[in-house]
Amino acid sequence: MRASNSRPTIKDIAKVAGVGVVTVSRALNNKPDISDSTRERIVALADQMGYRPNRHARFLKLSHNPAIALIIKGIDNPFFQQVLDPLEAIVREKNYLLTVVKVPHWADEVEEATKIVDEELMAGAIFLGGSFRHEASVFKKFNVPFVLSTVSRLPKVDDSAYSSVAVDDQEEATRAVQHLIDLGHTTIAALGVPEGDASVGAQRITGYRQALSNAGIPLDDDLIRFETREQMNPYTYEHGYHLAKRLLQERPDVTAIFAIADVLAIGAMRAIREAGLSIPDDMSIIGFDGITIGQFVEPELTTVVQPPLEIARLTCDVLFEQINDSAPVRHVFVPATIHAGGTTAPLVQSGEAK
């Protein structure tokens, strides 16, 4: 508890006002991007509490542009690179800086974020990618607004504790596998993540299972392929290549593959060709993400396309609503689309002409 004879701080005002520290700072310094009513309420409260600015601290703060922390979970994810550029452009348009922190797949992104998110210097945070295993307590460490981007609702955390912007990974994965089923395929493999993985890949595998169930196709767990290695990044071209190579050796009956990420699909395409098979005549494959390189492989990749510009825009909308107006948290699902490239085709039955 603050001593009665000590000066109230911005943190004290923020706590009483029920807003973020950055909102109080902007109100007291007559900055834009804050409503008049919020500004007037905070200024009046500061007067009542006897607040006096620390001139030295104020000088230090004014020497820095306000910054947003961007914590990227998955250093090599090409889709995140497509989201990063528009995110940075929007943040800069609002006269903020973007501080990028890259976190490996196996690391705890929230723990990493707490090391760099200083409430006096960071106005907010964006988590690009991340885990679904977090407990509600970890988010109480943040005294600044934050948004989970490309990560949808967390099963162990109340919706009121955070905001999110993402596609519905489970639903879109179900649609992807249904695309293969509609083409006549029933022996469909999935290139995924290890059991117990808490990334979006787990939700996409759940979507794979759901599609088979909806179609009345018996689930064969042997067709769900993954590797379990310590500190392994499952979202790489190499991982897709090795998973597919082993799959094709052990399950020659497979006619189609669902990959939980485009990088896995593109890696798998090499293994399919090395096995002497043709895409899509002998093997259909569909990915997930819509990364740019998928348009330039041969044949062009069929994939679930996440809209990076829309995700970036909505993520910033949600974040800055909370920074500037103390808006409540909200959850936004962004529609994805299936791009029908050249890697999927109707199943050719034995004896039929190709």
Image: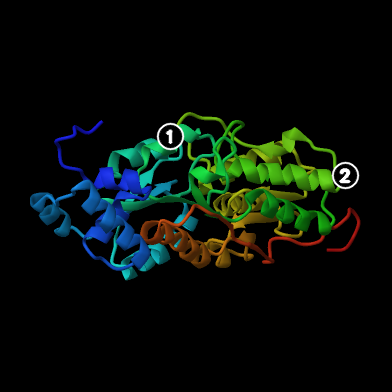
**Viewer-closest of 186 and 113:** 113
Task: Kindly give the residue lying farthest to the bottom in the view shown.
Answer: 93
Disc 2 on helix, strand or loop?
Answer: loop
Residue at image coords 21%, 61% = 29
Q: Which residue is mark 1?
A: 138
The type of residue carrying mark 1 is: Val
Q: Is residue 47 visible?
A: yes
* 80 displayed left or right of 187: left
Q: Nearer the viewer, residue 310 or 137?
A: 137
Indicate the quadrant where residue 5 lies. top left
Total numbered labels: 2
111, above or below 71, in the image:
above
Q: What residue is at 74 percent from the left and 51 percent from the top?
A: 256
Say which residue label 2 marks.
216
Q: Quadrant of the N terminus?
A: top left
The answer for how far apart the CA atoms under marks 2 and 1 are is: 41 Å
Query: Where is residue 88 shown, x and y percent of the image?
Result: 36, 63
**Above or below for 31 versus 117:** below
The location of residue 165, given as percent across then percent down, is 53, 55
Label 2 crowd bin: few (<14), some (14–19), many (20+), radius 10 Å: few
Q: Give the mark nearest the N terminus, 2 or 1.
A: 1
Residue 264 relative to residue 145: left or right: right
Q: Residues within 10 Å of mark 1 (few under 14, many from 20)?
A: few
